[in-house]
Image (spheres, rainbow, N blue to C red):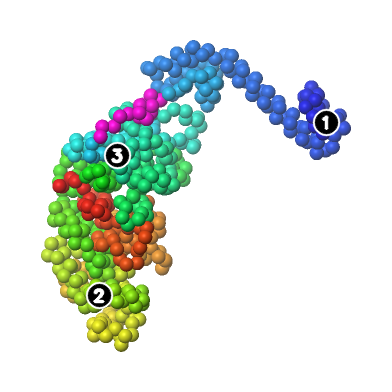
């Protein structure tokens, strides 16, 4: 048995004598190995204690305090001076200060933790990375917008530690031009919105909004990160939508040359979240991304060189229309956007709902409900689609109807339905079957809905599933079809090597290089009971090719107070 007395006796032996521990103390081979390990650990601990004692004895606390309190020196200069003076590594300086009770306080960060925020109805929330240069043009443009719309600026200080750095980073500094805007605290801007400025999210984090669902306690949350992201959380239908936003940044790219650093640099975005409070119940939030030159567009307000101008917006990519589920106020809002922003091109998704021709409506109750609601007649649903497209043909230069899963449902219903069981639709279904069969001889046939649209209109174009719709490097798809025959999703589209704008899930999202819109029609579709992440949402594409999601409040059915 190895006792403390035995250990102390063994420590007195010269190192060469320890080779024969087994024989000297009459131990087994296993006991001898264990004793050797204990002796090594004891000696290392003794050396460490001795080193610390020597270090503490040579340090002059007053001298160190004098260096630390010298306001003319940067923190890193102070560390260098102490390191050189006492011939010890910079990594050990922090240990000294801790042992000696000398605190290293970052006054900049300390102020940010307690800075008072002036309450107003509009805020611009962004982030800044430590020890990184600022995009001054972008910052100046943010200030110009803030002045124009009477908004307060909030900059969340974020930290990044370069894993490839030789010396450990012990202190963080932010651009002094941001001092008056830094907030490292949790701020409730509205009863439905929280800015989590106290969260330390690593700059290379792949999903900045991950695991923060409970941070807001049922409120929407904004966190600081150089990557722009948006998630819509499931809520009960009566509740306000809950969104998780990450801001983008005012800081330039400053990452390590690791894989994580390279990926983070690729997703780095100059940007902010625009917060717009209407009243005590309603608040609007929108992500905005900027160009490298610092210019950006908020709705139709273009900010460049600190000057603000109203501009035409080239594209509106609408959320799923599902015209059988039309919401009159949401439709009115979209028409107003088209006119006010002077939009020239519109992309439509799921314009034909297929309520009258849904292969999933096999339940007798579903079919009866459709009948009493006037949604069971295919001819009437097609007429309603034509009427809506007629408005677009008269008010928009070009409208594109993107091939969508609900449009395609009409084709599938015609293929699979026994006409004798649907007397109400028998004649129109026979006509559509004839069109479908004739289309098999035409290599340019894109489906029933595109065929009907293209025969009727010149400036409303029905697209096929493989047709490309692109503007300034943004590829627009419905999003129901993924790669190699798989189902599409925001996750699969976010991994593509180009920018995309999709619809389909009815859930607004920003992830990686993909933006996803929500709905432009009623929320209730009969099959979506209970918790839902669905939201009213469409997207604008600026002349520079920047996408912006337009999030409508589910109760007011508006998206901003700027144009009231």
Q: How many C-alpha atoms fall within 10 Å of the one at disc 3: few (<14), some, or many (≥20)?
A: some
Q: Is residue 351 visible?
A: no
Residue 362 found in image quarter: bottom left
Q: Which residues are magenta?
A: 106-119
Looking at the picture, tell me which residue is in the foreground, 338 or 446: 338
In this rendering, which labeled residue sits more in front, label 1 or label 2?
A: 2
Helix or strand or loop: what does disc 1 sit on?
helix
CA separation in Å, label 1 and label 2:
95 Å
Counting from the top left corner in percent of width and height, residue 40 is at 72, 29
- Residue 111 colored magenta? yes
Q: Residue at x 24, y 69 (%)?
A: 324
Which numbered dot is residue 21? 1
Residue 197 screen position, x and y as percent: 36, 37
What residue sits right under mark 3 in the picture? Answer: 189
Q: Residues within 10 Å of mark 1 (few under 14, many from 20)?
A: some
- Secondary structure of the residue carrying tag 3 is strand
Mark 2 or 3, nearer chain start: 3
């Amino acid at each position: 048995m190895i006792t403390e007395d035995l250990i102390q006796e063994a420590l007195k032996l010269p190192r060469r004598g320890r080779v024969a521990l087994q024989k000297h103390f009459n131990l087994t081979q296993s006991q001898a190995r264990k004793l050797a390990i204990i002796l090594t650990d004891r000696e290392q601990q003794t050396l460490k204690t001795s080193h610390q004692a020597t270090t503490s004895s040579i340090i002059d606390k007053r001298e160190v305090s004098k260096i630390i309190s010298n306001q003319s020196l940067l923190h890193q200069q102070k560390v260098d001076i102490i390191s050189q003076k006492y011939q010890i590594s910079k990594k050990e300086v922090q240990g000294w200060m801790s042992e000696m009770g000398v605190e290293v306080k970052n006054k900049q960060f300390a102020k940010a933790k307690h800075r008072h925020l002036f309450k107003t109805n509009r805020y611009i929330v962004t982030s800044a990375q430590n020890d990184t240069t600022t995009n001054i043009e972008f910052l100046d443009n943010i200030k110009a917008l803030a002045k124009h719309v009477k908004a307060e600026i909030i900059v969340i200080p974020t930290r990044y530690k370069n894993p490839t750095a030789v010396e450990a980073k012990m202190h963080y500094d932010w651009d002094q031009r941001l001092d008056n805007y830094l907030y490292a605290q949790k701020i409730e801007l509205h009863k439905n919105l929280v800015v989590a400025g106290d969260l330390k999210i690593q700059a290379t984090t792949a999903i900045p909004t991950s695991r923060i669902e409970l941070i807001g306690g049922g409120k929407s949350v904004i966190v600081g990160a150089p990557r722009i992201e948006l998630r819509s959380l499931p809520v009960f239908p009566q509740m306000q939508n809950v969104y998780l936003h990450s801001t983008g940044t005012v800081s330039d790219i400053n990452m390590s040359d690791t894989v994580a650093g390279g990926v983070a640099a690729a997703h780095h975005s100059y940007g902010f979240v625009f917060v717009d409070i209407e009243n005590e119940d309603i608040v609007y939030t929108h992500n905005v991304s900027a160009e490298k030159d610092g210019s950006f567009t908020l709705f139709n307000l273009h900010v460049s060189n600190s000057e603000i101008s109203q501009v035409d917006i080239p594209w509106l990519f609408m959320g799923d229309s599902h015209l059988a589920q039309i919401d009159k106020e949401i439709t009115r809002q979209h028409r107003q956007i088209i006119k006010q922003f002077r939009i020239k091109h519109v992309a439509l998704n799921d314009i034909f709902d297929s309520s009258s021709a849904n292969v999933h409506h096999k339940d007798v109750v579903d079919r009866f409900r459709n009948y009493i609601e006037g949604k069971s007649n295919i001819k009437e649903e097609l007429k309603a689609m034509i009427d809506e497209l007629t408005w677009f043909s008269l008010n928009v230069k070009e409208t594109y109807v993107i091939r969508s899963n609900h449009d395609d449902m009409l084709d599938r219903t015609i293929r699979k339905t026994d006409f004798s069981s649907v007397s109400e639709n028998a004649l129109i279904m026979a006509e559509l079957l004839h069109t479908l069969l004739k289309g098999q001889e035409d290599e340019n046939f894109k489906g029933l809905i595109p065929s009907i649209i293209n025969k009727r209109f010149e400036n409303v174009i029905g697209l096929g599933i493989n047709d490309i719709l692109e503007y300034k490097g943004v590829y627009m798809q419905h999003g129901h079809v993924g790669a190699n025959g798989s189902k599409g999703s925001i996750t699969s589209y976010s991994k593509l090597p180009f920018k995309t704008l999709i619809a389909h899930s009815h859930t607004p999202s920003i992830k990686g290089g993909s933006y996803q819109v929500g709905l432009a029609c009623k929320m209730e579709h009969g099959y979506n009971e209970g918790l839902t992440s669905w939201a009213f949402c469409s997207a604008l594409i600026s002349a520079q090719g920047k996408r912006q999601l337009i999030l409508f409040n589910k109760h007011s059915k508006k998206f901003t107070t700027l144009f009231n």
